Each structure stands twice: as structure tokens, then as C-alpha cells.
Image: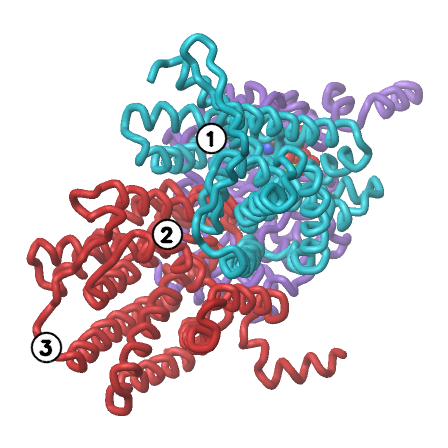
Chain colours: A red, B purple, C cyan
Amino acid sequence: MRKSNIVLLILLAVVAALPLVGGPYALRLGTIACMYAILALSWNVVGGFAGYPSFATAAFFGFGAYTTGVLLGKGLPLWLGVVISAVAALLVTAALGAALLRLRGHYFAIASLSLVEVLRELVNNATDLTGGGMGLNIPLVSGFGVLAEAMFFFYAMWILLLLTALMVMAVAGSKLGFGLACIRQNETASSMVGLNTTLYKSIAFGLSACFVSAAGGVYAAWVHYIDPSDVFDILYSVKPIVMALMGGLGSPLGVACGAFLYLGLEEVVWRNYIQFHTGVLGLIIVLLLLFLPHGLISLRPANLWRRVKHV
Amino acid sequence: MSEILRLENVSRHFSGLQALRDVTLAVNGGEVLGLIGPNGAGKTTLVNTICGVTPANSGKVSFDGKDITRIKTYQAARLGLSRTFQIVQPFAEFTALDNVAAAALFSQPGQSLNTAREQAMAHLVYVGLELQANQSAATLTLAMRKRLELAKALAMKPKLLFLDEVNAGLNSAEVERATKLIHELAAGGITIVMIEHLMKVVLNVCTRIAVLHNGALIADGAPREVIENPAVVEAYLGQQYTKRNAGRG
Amino acid sequence: MHAAQILVNAVVLGCLYACIAIGFSLVWGVLNVINLIHGSFIVLGAYLAFGLYNALHISPWYSVAVAAPLFFVLGYLLQRLLLNRVITAPVLVTLTLTFGLDLILNNAMIYFFKADYRKLMLTPSLGSVSIFDVVVPVDRLIATVSALALTGVLYLLLRRSRVGRAIVAVRLDRDAAVLMGVDVKSIYAIAFGLGAALAGCAGVLMALIFPISPLTSSGYLGKAFVVCVLGGLGSVSGALAGGLLLALVEGIGSTFFGPAHATTLSFILLIIFLILRPQGLLGRKGFE
Ligand SMILES: Nc1ncnc2c1ncn2[C@@H]1O[C@H](COP(=O)(O)OP(=O)(O)OP(=O)(O)O)[C@@H](O)[C@H]1O
Ligand SMILES: [Mg+2]
């Protein structure tokens, strides 16, 4: 196994030990950290490996949140609701991918962005099932206390993150990952050597959706109440991209670190500049893209040294 | 010799521009067919049409007895049709080895990445790129990239190989080396269709020549016959040349 | 509602949609950048009209003359100082960058103007005209005519002026334009400035009709997306065709399925168009 993958697994093990040292606040942050990492790692499959600029993450997230929310309302247990959400997202997205991934560049970006809009509007209008703009109340999962509940959702999210990380590593080291790398570099040449690009891209799109959808499901159960403008927030599409760019595209370890780092920044901004938090977030994005386009990896001592010598 | 590829009345246009007109052509197993014609004659388009990149608007293409007119590119590759690109198309971030491994991996279903890499090394040795195996494709010289294209095409275990101007941009030593390779391949039993502007190379390796002009096939036959055909001389070298020759004669 | 009224409403709204989208389309076509700040520029233009009317009693149709140069300079500088640094980067980067800029601008607007909806109330109100039994409010009519006039001005500018021809040349073939001696960098900045100016002016006109709030920016942006894709990227006539088609679909859609489904319908249409006819109704011919 690659060294960076081992480091990533160790990092995840460290995160799992969080409840030993932190209270409810740390657990809340830890849960969000896991969720962000799931989003970023998943996005990386289609955005980093295959090089398709997908802005559809919010669509997958909202889809999972509502599917699980509705199923919980019908009395299904949480785990079943999450599994159904994940599988449904995988299948639906893979099928959609076959059509959408024929588009490239800006057109694909716009189409994926529109997917978010379409789903949000559909949920908004399907009032009977989803409660529409009024939102959906989700029954409490169980009767345990505050801390126990925080612990439960932290580990639920952590397990999803572990699964996502394993999936991404497996993809990276497999024929699928190799094929996606070919597609990213030169799609025409890829199909010319016998690579079924449509199939590969669809699988990648499906995989990038399924764990995000599951995370949306856990999120819905965790916060007990969701509404379309919350779970279909376009920020859920953009944040994973920023995280992946922060960590340096492609490497799972980098992307996961990017997610944790991003959450740290976001938390600081939230606490200090509540009125300006989106503005500061925007500023971070702008500065990052202008000055560190290759992510924080370019800040490694070796690279810095090279830069100094360059000057 | 049995027929391996057959085109019947194949036409292809690009919004108004007729790139191929009613091309009917057969390629026999084991031969080296030279496809020549002036710039923009439609040679590359013909290869693209056979490989499913720009499918024919009308007409029929069959390969090994199967109708492949509407085939997808990747399926064509798996049937044993392979080609080099006129403008080289490497996977720039990959090493030379992985470039060839990709070809070996995806052209044969059920192949594993490790065996593909092993096979790839053999092909790199064959085209003389073994020293560059771990170098990224972006850093190779043009001549090396052309040979990389060839290694990729060979890694696909082709029955029919299209070589699209493999010699363009190479110096004479490099051309000689490439020509030798093509001879070896032909001797090894691969059917080859080569698009080539260098007449010396064409006459040296081809057993038959077909000429495209403005998308139409204007001649097809034994090399000497074809290049002495006045229509070909005129299309290929321009009217001036014909007149000058006439004046001399 | 009867057919004639639906049709007239669609034409009125369609011209406004075209006006919303035209600057977005110009920037996308010429710079190959999807400019996500576009929606917030429109809202900012609306606030400008609102402020000028309430403070100085300047009517919105005059405010256009104020908005155009202001927004042009804003856009020009933004492109020169920021966007230009990443102009050759992949889609992902330019798109995310304009998203970040949009977050900043939108947050600033929420801070200064608050998120509540305001309405520019003309006093005295202009009433409405009716021909047979088709009724059109006069303020809408004025907005529509002004929107058409703006599109016309852009069309003439691109067609007749030197700068306009240079913009078109860059759009059609950047490298050839460079060879012909066009300064691509400054053309990019001018095109982006024009895009911003058009957004600002569109915002001024929208203030006549729609409630104003920073929260409406994503709605405008969405319309611009749809219009561009439906009509075909990068031409004035394409934007008009796209705007009319969108308004017509929304009008008919909301008559049959209820107004709530109009937006859904338009985005589904967008995806269908992207897949089946990415060049849009009028093809991707480029700017006149
Ligand atoms: N994908 C395409 N879209 C539009 N036009 C095309 C396309 N491919 C080829 N053409 C046009 O078809 C004609 C034939 O081109 P083609 O590349 O087949 O010529 P060629 O014989 O290979 O020439 P050369 O010797 O220069 O390689 C040219 O006019 C070219 O511009
Ligand atoms: Mg050619």
C-alpha cells in the first residue's frame, strides 16, 4: 500500500479517538469534520481522478438527507434508511452520468450545478412527501442523552468516512483509477486504446454520489430538521472543491487534510466574524486560488526552497 | 490473401465540408497499404471513420466480416483496430511505461494492471524506449513520442494497424529507424495501412497504394503504376509539376 | 388566462430575461469564464436605482446612464486585477474564484442593505395599458423597451465599433486575433467590463418590477444560465431567442402545472438542451 494511504488511515484512527478527550462541542466539530472529508474525498473521485468539474455534490447530499428523512418518518431504522439512500444515489447518479458526462468543461459544470437546482425545486414542490419549503421534521432516533447521542452520530459519520476513504484508496489503486487518470489526461486517446469511457465515468460519478448521499442521511437524522435551502445549499458543492484544492487535487491524504483544515478555518471565521462569515469564506477562496493554486502541498519546505532559489 | 477490411461507398461530411466522398476500398490481410494524398485530402478522416471517432454519414464499413459502421471507438480498439495519431496524443502525466500499459490494459478485457505493465515493457524495448520507461511522456522528444505512439498501438495486439504520418517531423536517421520497424512489423504478419507523405518511404515499404484527393479515391493499385498515373501526379504534386514534366518530355 | 395574454407576458418577460443574460453570455463567450458574480451585479444595480430614486428622485430609466460607466469600471478593474491572473486555468478554478468573489459581494450587500425585500415604488404609479383584453403595466413596458434598447446598443457596439470587432475576433479565434495585433488582455478586461455594465443596467431595470434583496441574486444567475444554454452561447440574437423561449416555457408551464413548477421546468429544459443541443437554438456562431 502507498505510504500516504497508511498515513491517512492513521489520521482517521486519531480522529476516532476524539471522544476520549473532547466534550459535546468537540464531538460536534468532529462529526462535521468527518462529513466534510466524506464530501471532499467523494468529489475527488470525479473531480480529481477523472478531471470533471462537478458541482453536483449538494444534489447528492440533499438527495440523501431527504431520502433518509422520509424513510425515517415511515418508521425505518436509521441504518436501513442510510443504506437505501446510498444505493439509490449510486444507481440514479450512474445512470444520469451516462448522459451528463458526455458534456465537457463549462457545459458539464453548468449541468451539474443545475442538478442541484432541479432537485431542490422538486423537493420544494413535493409538499406532501417532503413538507416543501416548510422543511421536514425527522423523528428522534432514540431516547439516549445528549452526550450519548453526540457520540453515536460522531461514530456513524466516522464509519462512513472510513468507508469512503477505503473506497477512494481502492479506486486509486485499481484499473478503474488508472482508467480515470487516462480520461483526465486525454479522453480521445483513452477510448482509442479500448477504454469504455462512458462506463468508467458513470461508475466514478456514481461512487462520488453514494457516500455523500449516505452522509446526508446521517446528517438529517443528526439535526432532526432539514429544509431544501439548507441541504441543497450550493455551498455543499463548492466547499468540497475548495477543500480538495487546498489539499492539492488527487491525493486522498491531501484532500482529507484539506477538509480538516478548511473546517478549522471555517470555525474560526464563524466564531469571530459571524456577520461576515460568507464574505470571509469568499476571501479565503479568492486568496487560495490566486496565491496557492496547487494547494498547501506547494508550501512544503522542499518546494519553498525551490521557489526561493528560483527568485 | 483474404480481405480484412472493406469500405463501401463511405461518405462523411463536416457541416458542409465533404471530407470523404463515396470511398470504396478493400484491405487484404498481410499487406502494407500506403494511403497518400495532398493535405486535407481526408486521409486522417478515413482512419477516424473506420475507428468510430467520426462515424460515416453513409456507406458501410466491415472488418473481419463484421459490420462496424456504427461501432464505438473503444469497441473498434478491442476488435484489433489500432492506430497512431498524426498529432501525438500521449497521456502526458504518465510515464512512458504506463502509457503503453494503458493500451495493453484496456484493449484486452480481463487484463490486470501488473501483466499490462510487463507486456508494456516488452513493447518499449521493441521500439527502443526502454531507457525512457520511467520518464514522463511530456518530457520525451517528438521522435520518442512517435515511437511511444507505435508502442501503444502495438500493445493493443492489432490485427490492422493504421500509421498516421509516423515519420512527419523526424530527421533522416530517425526515419530510417522507423522504416526498419515497419518492415519488421509487416514481416511479423500485421496488416498495415500507412499514411505517409515521404514518397521514398512509401515506395520502400508499401505493397499497394491508394490515393485520396478531395475526399475521393482517385487511384488504387501497385506502387509504380499509381505514382505514374497522371491524375495522381496532378493531384499530388499540383499542375505546375505536370506541365514542367510535359515540357521536358 | 387566455393565450394572447400569456404570449404578451412571455414577450415582455423574455426581453427582460435576454437583458439579464446578455452580459453573462458575452463574458462566457469571450473570456471563456462562467461569471458567478453576475447575479450579484444585477442586484447591486437594482440597489443603485433604488437609492438614486429614493434619495435624489432620479427615475430608473435615467439611472441606467449612471450605472453603465460605474459598473464598467468595476468590472474592468476586477478582471485586470484578479481574474486575469487565472484566466488560463481550468474551469474549476475560474468558476470557484468567481464564486468566492460572489460570496464577498453578496455578504457585503447583506451587511449594508440587510436581507429584507424592498420595492421601488414609483410615485405616482404609472398604471397600465390595455389593448382589447390584454393588460400590461406601464412600468413593465418601459423596462422591456429599455431592455431591448440595451441589447440593441450592445449589438451595434459589437457590429460597428473597432473595439466591438476586436471583441468578436477574440471570441471567434483568440490566436488569430493575437496575430492580427489585437491586445487580448485589454479586450478581456473591456468585455468583462461590458458584461458588468450590462448586469448593472439590467439590475436598474429589474428594480422597476421586482422586489430587491441580495437573496434574489442566485435567481437572476439561474435565469442567465438557462437563457445562455437555450439560445446558444455568445450572441445577442441567441440571448433574445433564449430569453423568449424561457419566458414562454415558464408561462405555459405555470398555466398547466402551477407557478411553483416554472423554475423546475426551466432547469429540466436546460439539462435536456445541454445534452441534446449544446449549441443552443441558434447555434454557436459567435457574436454577430
Ligand atoms: N472533426 C472535424 N471537424 C471539422 N472538420 C474536419 C474534422 N476533421 C477533419 N476535418 C476537415 O476535413 C478535411 C480533411 O481533413 P483530414 O485531416 O482528414 O486531412 P488529411 O488528408 O489527413 O490531411 P493532412 O495531410 O494535413 O493530415 C479537412 O478540410 C479538415 O479541416
Ligand atoms: Mg491527416
- The numbered mark at residue C277 is 1
Residue in the image at 81% along x and 47% along y: C183
Q: Is residue B100 above or below residue B224?
A: below
Q: Nearer the viewer, mark 2 or mark 1?
A: 1
For the view shown, which residue lies furthest in the front direction? C124
For label 2, the SS is helix
| Ligand 1 within 8 Å of the CB at mark 1 | no
Residue nearest the observer in this picture, A152 or B230: A152
Give the distance between the C-alpha atoms of the residues marked 2 and 1, in whole angstroms. 24 Å
For label 3, the SS is loop
Q: Is residue A284 above or below residue B204?
A: below
Q: Position of residue C281 (x, y in %)?
A: 51, 26
Query: Which residue is tagged 2?
Result: A200
Q: Is residue B22 above or below residue C151?
A: above
Give the distance between the C-alpha atoms of the residues marked 3 and 2, in whole angstroms. 44 Å
Residue type, label 1: Arg
Where, quadrant-wise, is the C terminus of chain A in this rendering? bottom right
For the view shown, which residue lies furthest in the top direction? C132
Q: Position of residue C89 (x, y in %)?
A: 61, 57
Residue type, label 2: Tyr
Q: Position of residue B78 (x, y in %)?
A: 40, 45
Instruction: Name the quarter showing ligand 1.
Output: top right
Residue nearest the observer in this picture, C155 or C46: C46
Q: Earlier in the sequence, mark 3 or mark 2?
A: 3
Kindly indicate whether the residues beneath marks 1 and 3 are on one polypeptide chain.
Answer: no
Left of C142 or right of it: where is A11? Answer: left
Residue in the image at 42% along x and 61% along y: A178
Left of B92 or right of it: where is A218? Answer: left
Query: Which residue is tagged 3?
Result: A144
Left of A90 or right of it: where is C156? Answer: right
Q: Position of residue B89 (x, y in %)?
A: 58, 51
Give the distance between the C-alpha atoms of the residues marked 1 and 3, in whole angstroms. 55 Å
